[in-house]
Structure formats: structure tokens, C-alpha cells
Image (tube, rainbow, N blue to C red):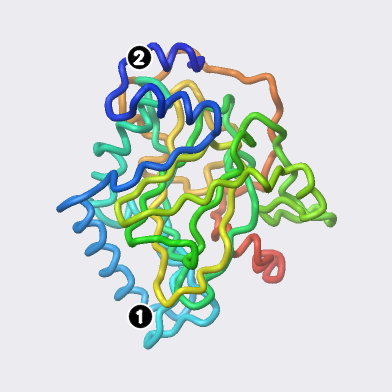
Amino acid sequence: MKIEDILSCTPKVLSQDQREYYFENGCLLLENFITGDRLKKLQDVTQDFIEKSRACSASNDMFDLEPGHTSEHPRVRRLNMPYRQHPAYWEFTSDSPITDVAEDLLGPDVKVHHSKLNFKWSDGGEEVKWHQDIPFYPHTNYGVLAIGLYLQDVDDEMGPMGIVRGSHKREIFDHYNDNDEWIGAIDEKHYGRIALDQVDWLKGPAGSVTVHHCRAVHGSVPNNSPRPRPLLINAYSAADALTVTAHPYPGERADEIVRGKPARWIGYDPEPCLIPPDFSKGYSSIFAAQQEEDIANAP
């Protein structure tokens, strides 16, 4: 849908000013947006998964683990596709206030693309280098966004998400290195074109929600605090935005309609998008890609 058509729909949870801010800047922060029992349930379920990770000695389909992970001292980088791992995550993804946010910003017909829970563990949890989301999962148009939920209080020391305001209106960057290897990040030689003086660091108390456009340049510094920074992320698209490459997390509920109905017409954007590698056989994580672990372990 065109922006003006979306703005003509009556919003469910956002103000018109918030919607206009998102379309102008490509990001939004909603402090204390999820509270009470809903937040506590997600926190408790997440802690249960941390306990489960103690039995793992290496990354698998469920967990992406930092190299220093042990049963005594777990260091989880990511819980993959949490909405497939527990009903509480799916309920939050498919029918909650964040689904309302997705509808307010994408229009009445909304699909879920994927979910992930990035922990950014304490005492040096890995940075996320500057990147854009859309090169990981191109769609026929750019009606795609990600909504994050901070499960714990997040301050500057913990490596909050940083978004370059207005970058969603600028170029889509190459996320390969000079050897044509996928690294899931923007090469430092392009940083002069990113406008890093226009970064909003989205921090806030537990229950705060971040929203960013699929083309927005974003990243975060290492977590140097003694506390993990779990961020539950759900990516959504407008129903008329179809995926054009292999889904990085294929299977149950990929591209499932969570609001409205399937599109009858496909929306096309004339601006091209970079093609990622073939992820049809699976995808580890942005952390592994950016640390070039996938390259090091390639046959």
C-alpha cells in the first residue's frame, strides 16, 4: 500500500504523529509498550530457554551460541524462530499490541516473515555491525519492517539498537565483502555514505518496543554491562510484498497472514535490491555471518 493509503486507515494503537514520524525517519521507539502479565510470561519463557541451552555444546536449529558458551556459564547469541519454539511467542507475534503496530504501519493485510530473539550477552556480548534487513530477505516491495521488544531494561552500556534516521529513503548497500562472500554487513569503506551523525539509540525500560523499516541502516555496539540484553524481534510484511528468494527460516508459519487477508495483487517497487546467498538449506545468524564464521567453516 502507498503511505498515504496507510495513513488514511484509522490506527489501532499508534497516533497519527507516530505513524508520520516512522514514515519520515524509518524508526520508532515505544517506551513501556508491553507491560504486566504479558511481559512477565515472555520473560519467564525466555529464562526457561536459557536453562535449556545449558545442555547444548554447539549451535543447533534452536540456539546460536557464542564460542565461549558452557553449561555453567551460558552465552546464547540467538534463539532461532521463537514463535515455533513456544506458544507464548506465537501468541505475541500473531495477536498482540505489536501486531496492531504492524497493521498501523503496513496496512490492514499483514504477514509475519520470521522471528528471532537476540540476547547480546553480558560482559562483551557481540556487536551487530551496520546493516540493512532487506538484503537478507528481498521482497517485491519495501512494505517490510521489524518490531523488537526489550525483555529487560536497556541503557547505553548494554548496546541498544541504533537506527540511522532517514536511511530507509537512501541507498541499499552491498552486504558482501571484496571477495564476494556474504558477511551480512556494510563494509566500513561505505560508512561515509551512511550519515552516522544521525543515529537514534533506541533504549528504554523492559517492555519498550523498537520499530525499524527494512531499508533502515541499523546496528549496535557490544554489551559491556553485567546484564544480558534480550531483544525479541518479529519481522512483518504487507500482504502484497512477496518474498523473492529462499526464506532464511523456511517451514511452518513462514509468510502466514496474521491480519486481514491475502493480497489479490502483488505490489512491485521499481528500485532494485541486492540478492543474498541461497538460504534454502538454512541460515545460522547475522552474528555468524558478520564474524565470518560461516566463511571460515565453508567446505
Q: Amino acid at mark 2?
A: Cys
Residue 65 placement, left or right of 192: left
- The residue indicated by pointer 2 is 9
Q: Position of residue 73 (x, y in %)?
A: 40, 84
Taking 257 as reference, is 64 above or below it?
below
Q: Can residue 9 be seen?
A: yes
Residue visible at 82% across and 53% down?
A: 189
Q: Can residue 245 be seen?
A: no
Taking 213 as reference, is 287 above or below it?
below
Q: Position of residue 155 (x, y in %)?
A: 43, 62
Taking 246 as reference, is 64 above or below it?
below
Residue visible at 47% across and 66% down?
A: 158
Residue 280 placement, left or right of 149: right
Closer to the N terminus: mark 2 or mark 1? 2
Number of other residues with Cα within 10 Å of mark 2, as a class: few under 14, some 14 to 19, many 20 or more:
some
Q: Position of residue 90 (x, y in %)?
A: 28, 46
Residue visible at 44% across and 40% down?
A: 211
Q: What is the tally of numbered marks visible in this picture?
A: 2
Looking at this view, is 130 or 277 the one in front?
A: 130
Residue 121 placement, left or right of 31: right
Cα separation between marks 2 and 1: 48 Å
Q: Foreground mark, 2 or 1?
A: 2
Q: Secondary structure at mark 2?
A: loop
Residue visible at 70% across and 66% down?
A: 298
Q: Amino acid at mark 1?
A: Ala
- The residue indicated by pointer 1 is 55
Q: Secondary structure at mark 1?
A: loop
Looking at this view, is 99 or 165 the one in front?
A: 165
Residue found farthest to the bottom: 72
Label drawn at residue 150: none
Number of other residues with Cα within 10 Å of mark 1, as a class: few under 14, some 14 to 19, many 20 or more:
few
The answer to which image quadrant residue 47 occupies is bottom left
